[in-house]
Image (cartoon, rainbow, N blue to C red):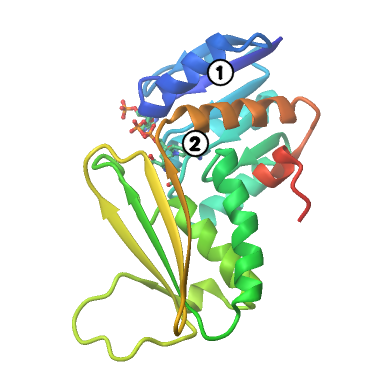
Amino acid sequence: MLKVAVMGASGRMGKMLIEAVEAAEDCTLHVTLDKGDDVRTGLTGADVMIDFTRPEATLAHLAVCADLGVKAVVGTTGFDDAQKAEIARFAERTAIVFAPNMSVGVNVVLKLLDLAARAMNEGFDIEIIEAHHRMKVDAPSGTALQMGQVVADALGRDLKQCAVYGREGVTGVRDPSTIGFATVRGGDIIGDHTVLFAGTGERIEISHKASNRGIYAQGSLRAARFLAGQRTGLFGMNDVLGFAR
Ligand SMILES: NC(=O)C1=CN([C@@H]2O[C@H](COP(=O)(O)OP(=O)(O)OC[C@H]3O[C@@H](n4cnc5c(N)ncnc54)[C@H](OP(=O)(O)O)[C@@H]3O)[C@@H](O)[C@H]2O)C=CC1
Ligand SMILES: O=C(O)C1=N[C@H](C(=O)O)C[C@H](O)C1
């Protein structure tokens, strides 16, 4: 039986995770924690922590996990490079799955994007469009950024150099070496992502549209089960799902 700690318990994902853990035959809900709770006491005795909160909270939680040897599934997005490096350091002391999107569908789309970008490596302008609910506090989404990274890697580009985040004013002709990002926020959109390969005479769109946050919770449980066989290390959903790189 996997003893699971859910962080951010009162959040949109926290509530879905609690429901999923309680319904899983091989998991038991060790503790649910929210802002202000005693994290070290709460995590003591847990096998794995699942954290969908905010970057600063997640890092504080991971420090405790590393001390206690508790594994971690991190779904939180919005980390900067320094914070991601800190996550990697924690993974030297415990096992962590860190993924901006835990759904099987998005991780299949990421594999499709690698193939598509390699095939359409010339003559196609690449734009990434994402749409989320009005309550989302970070942009672009972590998923959109990972999609951009996959495409940039496939094309041999440096995403930090080629990314264009939003456009306004007289922008001039589109630079074909760029990858554009557009962000929509509104309503109760769970999470829509489209990668557009705009060519001359044809346009290819690869999309994922989420309609229930349960897909992220179920992906998180798959990640938690995967970690049961790991002692330390930083892993992604490719590792959890057995997708060959
Ligand atoms: N990887 C994936 O598959 C997915 C990732 N996400 C990501 O998960 C994160 C959470 O999303 P969502 O559940 O919609 O957000 P919510 O705002 O609904 O939930 C966030 C939770 O974290 C808590 N929290 C915030 N700050 C702290 C803190 N400093 N210490 C402890 N707890 C804190 C909040 O508590 P309080 O309300 O009291 O502030 C709340 O319970 C986001 O980064 C989002 O992008 C979301 C869905 C899927
Ligand atoms: O905040 C959300 O809701 C989501 N965030 C993740 C992201 O930033 O990619 C995953 C999913 O799109 C939902």
Viewer can see residue 236 = no
User: Residue reaching furthest front?
Assistant: 201
Please, what secondary structure does the residue beneath circle 1 have? Answer: strand
Q: Which quadrant would residue 111 be assigned to in this image?
A: bottom right
Name the residue at 70% across, 43% down. 235
Q: Residue at x 53, y 57 (%)?
A: 146
How many circles with numbers are drawn on the protein? 2
Residue at the disc numbered 1: 5
**Relative height, residue 150 to residue 14 (above, below):** below
> Residue 58: percent from the left, percent from the top?
49, 36
Q: Residues within 10 Å of mark 1 (few under 14, many from 20)?
A: many
In the displayed structure, does residue 31 sit left or right of residue 93? left
Q: Position of residue 245 (x, y in %)?
A: 76, 56
Numbered circle sitting on residue 58: 2
- Real-space Cα distance between discs 2 and 1? 13 Å
Label 2 or label 1, whichever lies nearer to me, is 1
